[in-house]
Image (cartoon, grey):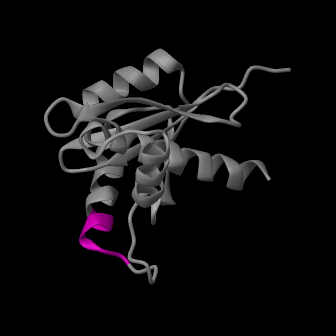
């Protein structure tokens, strides 16, 4: 089997950016430590992309339940533009992230994580839900 590069997913937020990475066969998603939003975030993401040999980054793009753009959609679009202008040789795609946080909370609660424990895990768990949805959609 040929080795395929990993895909990472980012779930940008105002405080943290959730991170998930695929396995090399691009069939399963796993949470990674979230990255603090703000100064240094783009650099930290660029370092992660380089260290993992990533060629594809999936960024969660929130839209309303009706499928229309929101203020958060515009924020995600700016985030993608900032990344694309800072990191070369990588493809950036957006993917609908509706209800990923709801699903992530449900998963963490099922795993016995308290509301307090979920705070530090929720962003990357949402990125994991996002990435797994993307992988399932593109591998079928």
Relative horizontal placement of residue 77, taking residue 15 as reference (left or right): right
Residue visible at 46% across and 79% down in the picture: 67
Residue shown at 44% from the left, 26% from the top: 49
Q: Is residue 51 magenta?
A: no
Q: Position of residue 11 (x, y in %)?
A: 38, 47
Q: In the rendered structure, which segment of residues is drawn in magenta? A: 69-74
Question: Where is 102 relative to 127, above or below?
Answer: below
Closer to the camera, 59 or 108? 108
Side of 85 relative to 36 (left or right): right
Q: Position of residue 24 (x, y in %)?
A: 67, 25
Residue 5 seen in the figure: yes
User: Magenta residues: mostly which secondary structure?
Assistant: helix
Q: Nearer the viewer, residue 94 or 9?
A: 9
Q: Residue at x 34, y 37 (%)?
A: 121
Is residue 92 in view from this perspective?
no
Q: State which quadrant residue 47 falls in.
A: top left
Q: Measured from the top left, where is residue 131 in percent x and y?
A: 55, 45
Q: Residue furthest top?
A: 51
- Please, is residue 133 above or below residue 18 in the view? below
């Amino acid at each position: 089997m040929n080795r395929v590069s990993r895909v990472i997913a980012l779930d940008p937020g105002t405080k943290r950016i959730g991170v998930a990475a695929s396995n090399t066969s691009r069939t399963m998603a796993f949470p990674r430590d979230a990255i603090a939003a703000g100064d240094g975030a783009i650099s930290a993401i660029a370092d992660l992309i380089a260290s993992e040999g990533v060629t594809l980054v999936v960024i969660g793009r929130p839209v309303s339940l009706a499928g229309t753009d929101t203020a958060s959609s515009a924020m995600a679009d700016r985030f993608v533009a900032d990344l694309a202008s800072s990191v070369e040789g990588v493809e950036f795609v957006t993917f609908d992230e509706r209800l990923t946080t709801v699903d992530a909370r449900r998963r963490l609660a099922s795993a016995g994580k308290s509301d307090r424990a979920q705070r530090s895990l929720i962003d990357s768990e949402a990125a994991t839900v996002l990435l797994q949805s993307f992988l399932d959609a593109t591998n079928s």
